[in-house]
Image (tube, rainbow, N blue to C red):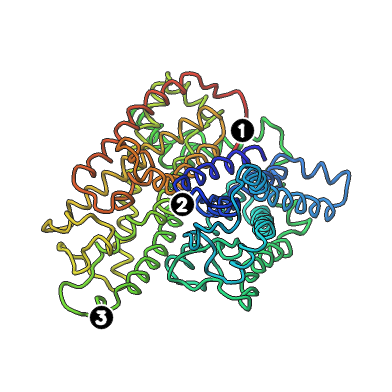
Amino acid sequence: MIISLFISILVLLLGAYAVRDYPEEMSFVDQWYFIYTESFFVQMLPLIVTLPFADSLSSDRKLGYFDRALMRTRYKPLLRSKGIANALAGGAAGALPLALLYLLVSLINKNPINHPALTVVFGRPYESQFLVDLYTTMPDLFILVVILAVFVMGALFASLGMAVTLLVNHRLVALSFPFLLANGLQYFANNARLLPWFLAPSEPLLKPNFSQSHAFETVNEIPYLLILPALLLGGTLLLYLLLGSRQQVLENSRNKGNHQSLFNRVSNGLEEKIPKGLRSFPIPEKRLGRGTPTGNYFFTQFKLAVSPFIMILIALVMAVLSIVMLGWMKRQVPHVFNGSGGLPPNTWDLFFRTYGDPLAMSLVIANLYLILASGLQPQTAFGHLAIKRLGSRTRSWRSHVLFLLLLSAFYVLFCFAVIMLTGQLLGLRFSTQWSVLCSPEHTNLPSFFCNEGNPWMAFLTVFAMTTLGFFSLGLLVLLINTLTQRRLIGYFIVEVLLVASMPLASIFLNAPPALQYLPIIRNLVLRFYPFIFRDLNQTWASIYQWGIWIAILLPLTWLAYRKQNYFSQPDLE
């Protein structure tokens, strides 16, 4: 709960900073609602509400606490109590920061509710006359309605996070699935407009979208706002109904080895990390004496992280993302795809459009890379034995750094290949020239790239920016995981920083140049405020920025490796 409150306060402080230039005459309800809508609180809500308790069922099953609790009580009351506690904790984690903000602005802001100097203010809920009347005549009730909506949605997202661990018993699933689902629905319903407007989580949370999609406007449309909560509740109950029986939960826990001793759990986990070709004795002679210890250790790490199953999953996700992006392009410029003249759209347009979209980059492309990179540390027992074999921590650190660098380049090229292949399967052609779509608003590229004779210079620039960027973010994940001895901490911190960099970019819109390059997302995509019309020097500045990150993180990770106690505890998530 403390971590959730800290993240909430940090996000709301960013919102308060974003509205610092709003009219001084705004009332307390204006100040509260503007901070709520400008702070990315809605986007971060699924993560905030799952942190307190949503992963408790998965953790208790893996550690054996759930089985021990069943010795003192019955199964259904225990599962029901955990579900209710999780829902209440999730709802409170989302509603409590907004309630504290309401208390604070009510005490500080003494402006009248309807100031004569303010008639129309951007940011008020003008989408619905019903909300406008409630906003201007009963502002306290309006705030309480929004807080209640946040509480209900927070409880539903937290419940869904706990329920989905019945399908995949892992803490990462409990914490990440609601976050990815909510932002995916928001993207498809509000941005891509491929889903009905009422499936965007911002609608039941009463946050205006200011988009071309239809939004909540009349009292008659209030029932539409209940569709998404009903679907979340129905999905949660369905998971409990299908997968929540006592026999299924306990058998799944036992199959994971929860009743083994600590030594056996570490031993079995260590055995799974050894390649199958080296588990049997005697080891085939052809497998011995190959390469150096550092090289063998590096390739072992690569095989563990880049498994065929993971790469197939990434390929499927990137293919779906490419299909969505192509559908969005066809919606925006249908006449171009109908053969209106000029070179027809090709696979380069799809690649640059996908890699240049901030939401696609932060929620999908970079997110998948962070999941891959988060498996390096901590290694505990496996790392202890590896250090013994390698002879020094320097070799282990060198292998991990080299692995992250090559993984970054490999991942960018792999996603590039998937997008290009998907585009060809969807009817686009590969070409060595720009198409008629080559413009900043259609391909997310600065205009000076379109003046080049072919797309290769633009591709090399995107490849360099994303490879160095992913390598830097991977080093940051490695540093955090090494210091905290937890795999998920680094992933979540860096992903939160990445998502939070989008509102931070708006805050630093008129900041000095040094601060303008601070948000992560600006250095991963070419077109993001204030770099809509980025020139060549600003492009190189982003590459230099990643060089600074690498120069700082490399010695820090080395110092963290020198202090790491590998064998002090079992391998934890």
Q: Secondary structure at mark 3?
A: loop
Amino acid type, residue under disc 3 in the picture: Asn
For label 3, the residue is 338
Residue 265, x across and y down, in percent = 65, 35
Which corner quadrant holds the N terminus?
top right
User: What residue is shown at x 31% (from left), y 31% (from top)?
Assistant: 548
For label 1, the residue is 267
Mark 3 Cα shell of 10 Å, populated few (<14), some (14-19), many (≥20) = few
Q: Secondary structure at mark 2?
A: helix
Residue 166 appears in view: no
User: Between 70 and 237, which is closer to the camera in this rendering?
Assistant: 237
Amino acid type, residue under disc 2 in the picture: Ile
For label 2, the residue is 310
Residue 513, x across and y down, in percent = 29, 38
Q: Tell which circle, 3 or 1, labels the residue nearer the N-terminal end.
A: 1
Front: mark 3 or 1: 3
Amino acid type, residue under disc 1 in the picture: Ser
User: Between 521 and 35, which is closer to the camera in this rendering?
Assistant: 35
Q: Residue furthest left?
A: 453
Q: Is residue 561 above or below residue 311?
A: above
All told, the count of numbered labels is 3
User: Between 522 and 209, which is closer to the camera in this rendering?
Assistant: 209
Residue 11 appears in view: yes
- Separation of marks 1 and 2 at Cα, in angstroms: 24 Å
Name the mark on residue 355.
none
Q: Secondary structure at mark 1?
A: helix
- Separation of marks 3 and 1 at Cα, in angstroms: 61 Å
